Amino acid sequence: QVQVAESGGGLVQPGGSLRLSCVASGRIFTIKSMGWYRQAPGKERELVAAIVSGGNTNYADSVKGRFTISGDVAKNTVFLQMNSLKPEDTAVYYCSADVVWGDHTYDFWGRGTQVTVSS
């Protein structure tokens, strides 16, 4: 199987920064993409940022210019640098990995890491 583990969440004041890390391990041959999602209380999970194996990235409009996804999908590791954090960024942040096995692609998720932006 595949394990996905996030780290780096915490409590930060508005305007502050945090860096999240994600590592995928286990029975991995190829990862097509990795992404960060978040879910705030009472809301649906939403895409924050994603990076594909070729290096292309995409971001939610709400985080463009503030968050940066980086890392090496081929090495199963991605990061999310979050700057100028706002209270509305408070959520559980999840990392996902799209793993290719043969002709199929499977999504694997981490357990999430809490990010709280509050004064």
Image (cartoon, rainbow, N blue to C red):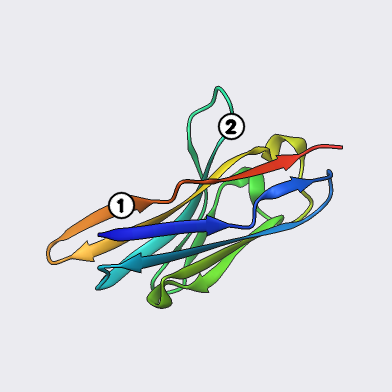
Label 2: few (<14), some or many (≥20) within 10 Å?
some
Label 1: few (<14), some or many (≥20) within 10 Å?
few
Label 1 SS: strand
Q: Residue at x 25, y 68 (%)?
A: 27
From the viewer's perspective, tell me whether residue 59 is left or right of residue 10. left
Q: Real-space Cα distance between discs 1 and 2?
A: 21 Å
Q: Earlier in the sequence, mark 1 or mark 2?
A: 2
From the viewer's perspective, tell me whether residue 45 is left or right of residue 20. left
In the picture shown, does residue 30 fall above or below 50? below
Res 8 → quadrant? bottom right
Task: Give the total of numbered labels.
Answer: 2
The residue labelled by disc 2 is 40
Q: Which mark is drawn over residue 60?
A: none
Identity of the amino acid at label 1?
Asp
Which residue is the extreme one toward the top? Answer: 42
Q: Look at the image and tell me whether residue 3 can be seen.
A: yes
In the picture shown, does residue 51 fall above or below 117? below
From the viewer's perspective, tell me whether residue 89 is left or right of residue 53. right
Q: Horizontal and vertical percent for residue 36?
A: 51, 52
Q: Horizontal and vertical percent for residue 89?
A: 68, 40
Identity of the amino acid at label 2?
Ala
Q: Residue at x 43, y 51 (%)?
A: 110
From the viewer's perspective, tell me whether residue 46 is left or right of residue 7. left
Which residue is the extreme one toward the left? Answer: 103
The residue labelled by disc 1 is 107
Q: Nearer the viewer, residue 64 or 31?
A: 31
> What is the quadrant of the C terminus in the image?
top right
> What is the quadrant of the N terminus in the image?
bottom left
Label 2 SS: loop
Q: Look at the image and tell me whether residue 82 can be seen.
A: no
Res 68 → quadrant? bottom right
Q: Horizontal and vertical percent for residue 70?
A: 56, 69
